[in-house]
Image (cartoon, rainbow, N blue to C red):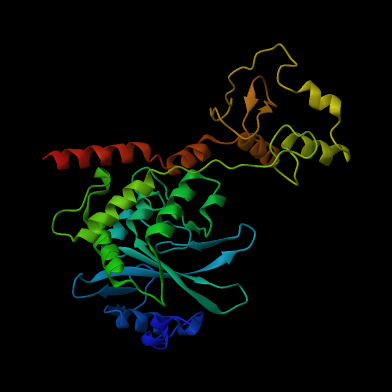
Amino acid sequence: MKIASLLAGPPPSSTKCSCIAVHDLKDVYQRRFEQAGFNIFSRRESSRQVLTDHWISSRAVPKTSFHLKLVIRHNPSNCFRCSISSGKPGYPIKSAQIRSQMRMLLVFFRKGDEDNTVLPQFLLFPAWLLHLFRYSQHGSTPGRCDIRFLEDVTTAKEDQIFRFNNVINTLFRFDLDHIDKRQIEAVIGLSNHLADSNPEHGLRPPTRNFSHSVHYLYADLVDLLGQRRPDKLKPACLNCFKKPSSRRSLCVACYRYQLKHKKPRPERLIVANRPGSRMIPSLHKICNNCGVERTHQWYRNMLGKGHWCETCKSYYIRHKKLRPRELYIRVANRKVDLRQLISRVKVESDVESDI
């Protein structure tokens, strides 16, 4: 037995709230924040046109607006999904609303669909990230209402979803049982700085008026935005042992052959498609409809010469017509290219350090 443990006495009793009932969530989280030294002010009148639900403040940070969301797990994709819209359902929020109505987003997670309890872990992050990742509508960007929160960021299928969840899970995840006041004050300061900055100028370092915690949090944010999604290691196909498995432990070719002929793909087809078996060099392929150069699977153009990407082929099979141009232009506008943004931020930081 250690003498130090005897002298220290019994450990202090911690009042953990574990899971919270849905109808008690508002009272519990406000009480926890007030115990940590924050003041929560609620909006008296509820309106769909206004995204401001509450305000939070303390002695070190000013009164800041935030929007509260309670999200539910989506079983097929095994992620938490929520919809944030302004006014009518299905209309994405605008970037101008982030500055005036919703500078932060407070997200709680329900334990299950049939379980009316809420997990004590929550997210509190700057709503400006919705503008950065093009969830909000601005300029030619249409925005989107559906937001996905992943517990395991390695399961993200898109680089945009990986970077968004990697940032918020690393920097902006908290627990009601152990509220870090200093870190939350840094989040509030960073949210005000990002909301007051011009969205067209991108990321800019905070001024000297902010505390050191805000500067450290901003530096971590820039570093995490530069991290790319790691490559996924898929097991090999159990039939041909050549390509990575896609569905039911089979590659795309073996799976579709099995689905069509009700038997495994024969060895003669596998050998005929091996690299080096043909002397014809592989040509650079491009979709004759949308013009993409990379896709999961290439298909023959069913209306002429050339190839189709997987998306255009699926659209034609389903709708019996070509995939319209406005669809893939809209998807292209939603994609986030953070390379230019991160390089520009580093250049601005180097210039300010030299000054």
Q: Which of these two is toward me, 30 or 306?
A: 30
The outermost residue toward the top is: 279
Q: Which of these two is toward me, 91 or 345?
A: 345
Q: Which quarter of the figure has residue 192?
A: bottom left
* Residue drawn at 67 percent across, 21 percent down: 304
Can I make out residue 172 in this image?
yes
Q: At which x and y percent is residue 223? A: 34, 47
Can I make out residue 44 in this image?
no
In the displayed structure, does residue 200 sit left or right of residue 15? left
In the image, residue 189 sits, relative to residue 247, either above or below, namely: below
Instruction: Quadrant for the C terminus, please.
Output: top left
Total numbered labels placed on residues in the image: 0
* Residue drawn at 27 percent across, 47 percent down: 203
In the displayed structure, does residue 242 sit left or right of residue 47? right
In the image, residue 65 sits, relative to residue 136, either above or below, namely: below
* Residue drawn at 54 percent across, 79 percent down: 117
In the image, residue 109 sits, relative to residue 41, either above or below, namely: above
Q: Which quarter of the figure has residue 52?
A: bottom left
The outermost residue toward the left is: 355
Q: At which x and y percent is residue 303? A: 68, 25
In the displayed structure, does residue 248 sit left or right of residue 31? right
Q: At which x and y percent is residue 41? A: 28, 79
In the image, residue 348 sits, relative to residue 52, either above or below, namely: above
Q: At which x and y percent is residue 222? A: 32, 47
In the displayed structure, does residue 51 sit left or right of residue 21? left
* Residue drawn at 81 percent across, 36 percent down: 257
